[in-house]
Amino acid sequence: MIVRTWHGCVPLKHAEGFAKHLEKTGVEHSRSIPGNRGVFVRRESLDDWEHFFLATYWQDLHAVKAFAGENYHVAVTYPDDKEFELLSDPYVFQHLVEALSPL
């Protein structure tokens, strides 16, 4: 299994709107790809920013590439992200998971 992690932040005034937008874009898009094994979103406020951490779980690298393309180390962003003044990390990390226990 592969865990793909992304981070981005928006001004606090856009936090709730971006949370809904993220659900309709990154979360739903991830879940629609065969080989997706789950999605986890974490939020944290820090000063004037709301930070979003997205972890997606994938069966294998083929599934990751089906979501992100051949340049899968680059963050997947969406055209409407700019409306929320999103500051997205340009790159994501893929972590090979060797063992997983039930939550």
Image (cartoon, helix red, strand yellow):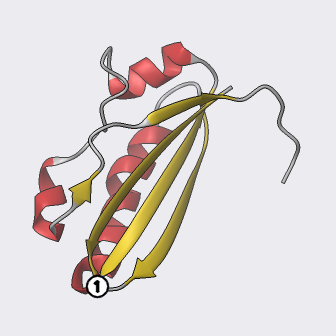
Q: Is residue 76 left or right of residue 102?
A: left
Quarter holding residue 3: top right
Instruction: Give whichever of 71, 46 is nearer the camera.
Output: 46
How many numbered marks appear?
1
Residue occupied by mark 1: 48
Instruction: Give whichever of 29, 86 is nearer the camera.
Output: 86
x and y, in percent, of residue 85 in the image: 15, 67
Q: Quadrant of the N terminus?
A: top right
The correct choice, above or below, for 34 with respect to 22 in the image is: above
The correct choice, above or below, for 37 with respect to 39 in the image is: above
Q: Quadrant of the C terminus?
A: bottom right
Using a 10 Å C-alpha cutoff, classify the residue at mark 1 as few (fewer than 14 neighbours), some (14 to 19) or many (20 or more).
few
Circle 1: residue type: Asp
Residue found at x 28% / y 85%:
48
Instruction: Give whichever of 48, 35 is nearer the camera.
Output: 48
x and y, in percent, of residue 88 in the image: 26, 53
